[in-house]
Image (cartoon, helix red, strand yellow):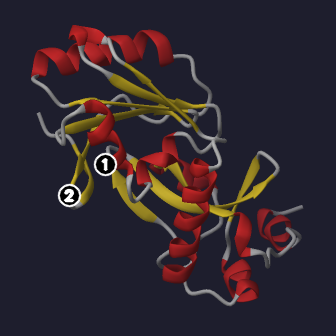
Amino acid sequence: MSSAQSARSVEVISDPEHIYPYVVPVEYLSHQPKAPSGLTRELGNGLSVVLVHDLNGLVRNVLGEDLAAMKLTPAQAYERALKNLNKLAESGEIKMQVFQKGPSGQPFILTGGHWAAATAILLPKLREIAAGALKTDSICVSIPHREAMLIFPKGDAKSRQAFLTLIQEKEDSGRKPLTFLLFELTADGVIELRE
């Protein structure tokens, strides 16, 4: 069966309650059916964001036919996906735990326990939550693989390197690797950290 026939035989999704954003390496996109314009967004550090449908822990990309069945534009689908991600985080399925003493004696937040843990970097109030827990609004984020996100004070180059060393030691073997490059949470959103 050709990939075009295979793509056509996939069941159309009409329920927007289970669509989510999903952070993937850019290379992932070359192995997927061409998404309609606006369904893929660049995050930075070699990563993109796609929309997926959660099939009880397995995910499938949202396709143009799905958007038509849900009667959503790409922008509306992203808005709905972010709301669904927020509900998932509020439900506690994505676990967040604050550790008061990490590398260099600095606190950090570890997020995990779900395939969308790294994607939680997109949560609209993540910066506000992290700033309260870490007592700073200068915040770095690492998403080494899809089931882990670490949030810590930006600090200086030495403290960031201490966190990177810890992350590489503890999270190097995670399934579905993403990146060891860092992001920064700013008032304007998520950006690549430039050293």
Residue 87, compared with residue 153, is above or below; it is below
Residue 183, compared with residue 66, is above or below; it is above
At horizontal 55% and vertical 40% (from top left) the residue drawn is 117
Give the image location of residue 170, x and y in percent: 48, 12
> 173 and 148: which one is in front?
148
Residue under numbered circle 2: 187
Residue 40, compared with residue 156, is above or below; it is below
> 98 and 179: which one is in front?
98
At horizontal 37% and vertical 59% (from top left) the residue drawn is 42
Secondary structure state at the residue bearing disc 1: helix
- Quadrant containing the C terminus is top left
Mark 2, other Cα within 10 Å: few <14 / some 14–19 / many ≥20: few
Q: Quadrant of residue 168?
A: top left
Q: CA distance from mark 2 to mark 1?
A: 8 Å
Mark 1, other Cα within 10 Å: few <14 / some 14–19 / many ≥20: many
Amino acid type indicated by mark 2:
Ala
* Between discs 2 and 1, the one toward the N terminus: 1
Residue under numbered circle 1: 127
Marks counted in the figure total: 2
Secondary structure state at the residue bearing disc 2: loop
Can residue 173 be seen?
A: yes
Amino acid type indicated by mark 1:
Arg
Answer with left or right where residue 113 lies relative to residue 4. Answer: left
Residue 45, compared with residue 154, is above or below; it is below
Can residue 177 be seen?
A: no
Residue contact between numbered discs 2 and 1, judged by CB atoms under 8 Å? yes
At horizontal 50% and vertical 48% (from top left) the residue drawn is 119
Answer with left or right where residue 23 lies relative to residue 159. Answer: right
Give the image location of residue 182, x and y in percent: 28, 35
